[in-house]
């Protein structure tokens, strides 16, 4: 019995469909990450953090290239929401870059002094988490 495959039930997805969904969402995540870094770099230019962000961006570009190869090899289309993730990722990157350097130092000081307990912190954190979950759910299906 240990060598037998589990029985499929009506409505179960084919393994190839499951793999396609996983590849689609992973590809979307890597693409979004490259757009976030591009948005940050366009705002920061040659600022102190730009070198480190460039290194992280190059790593993400390598991940993205590998997922693009996998999509091609397995004949899986990318998510239909690709243009949305392009704009949203870039906007998120640019917005967070506007809050760097002095603001990062302020953030670290604020967290050290209990900012995580501040009014609205939990709401913002939940909104970011929910947005990520929705993006993943949509990318697997569209």
Image (cartoon, helix red, strand yellow):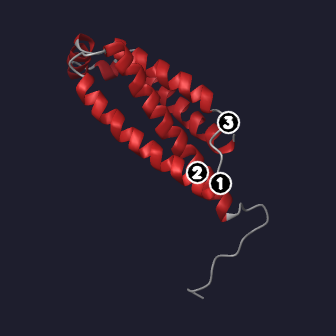
Whichever of callouts 3 and 2 sits on the residue coming sooner in the sequence is 2
Q: Considering depth in this image, is 124 or 18 the residue closer to the camera?
A: 18
Q: Position of residue 110 (x, y in %)?
A: 24, 16
**In the image, 76: left or right of 128?**
right
Does the residue at mark 2 contact the one at mark 1 (Cβ under 8 Å)?
yes
Measured in 3D between alpha carbons, the distance from the residue under mark 2 to the one under mark 1, in whole angstroms, is 6 Å
Residue 75 badge: 1
Q: Position of residue 119 (x, y in %)?
A: 40, 14
Question: Which quarter of the rendered picture does the N terminus lie within?
Answer: bottom right
**In the image, 89: left or right of 18?**
left
Measured in 3D between alpha carbons, the distance from the residue under mark 3 to the one under mark 2, in whole angstroms, is 14 Å
Residue at coordinates 42% horizontally, 15% vertically from top-left? 95
Image: 34 above or below 93 = below
Q: Is residue 120 at all visible to an observer of this figure?
A: no
**Pointer 1 local density, CA inside 10 Å: few below 14, some 14–19, many at least 20:** few
Residue at coordinates 64% horizontally, 51% vertically from top-left? 76
Whichever of callouts 1 and 3 sits on the residue coming sooner in the sequence is 1
Q: Identify the image quadrant of residue 112.
A: top left
Measured in 3D between alpha carbons, the distance from the residue under mark 1 to the one under mark 3, in whole angstroms, is 15 Å
**Pointer 2 local density, CA inside 10 Å: few below 14, some 14–19, many at least 20:** some
Residue 139 badge: none
Image: 138 above or below 68 = above
Task: Tell me the SS state at disc 3.
Answer: loop
Residue 71 badge: 2
Q: Position of residue 25 (x, y in %)?
A: 56, 44
Q: Is residue 84 at all visible to an observer of this figure?
A: yes
Q: Identify the image quadrant of residue 142.
A: top right
Q: Position of residue 91 (x, y in %)?
A: 48, 18
Mark 3 highlights which residue?
80
């Amino acid at each position: 019995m240990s060598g037998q495959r589990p029985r499929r039930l009506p409505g179960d997805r084919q393994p190839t469909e499951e793999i396609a969904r996983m590849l689609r969402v992973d590809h979307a995540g890597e693409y979004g990450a490259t757009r976030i870094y591009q948005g940050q770099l366009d705002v920061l230019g040659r600022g102190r953090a730009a070198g480190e962000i460039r290194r992280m961006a190059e790593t993400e570009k390598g991940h993205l290239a590998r997922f693009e190869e996998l999509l091609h090899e397995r004949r899986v289309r990318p998510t239909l929401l690709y243009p949305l993730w392009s704009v949203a990722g870039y906007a998120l990157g640019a917005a967070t870059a506007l809050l760097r350097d002095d603001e990062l130092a302020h953030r670290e000081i604020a967290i050290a002094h209990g900012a995580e307990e501040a009014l609205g912190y939990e709401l913002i954190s939940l909104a970011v988490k929910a947005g990520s979950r929705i993006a993943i759910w949509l990318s697997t299906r569209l």
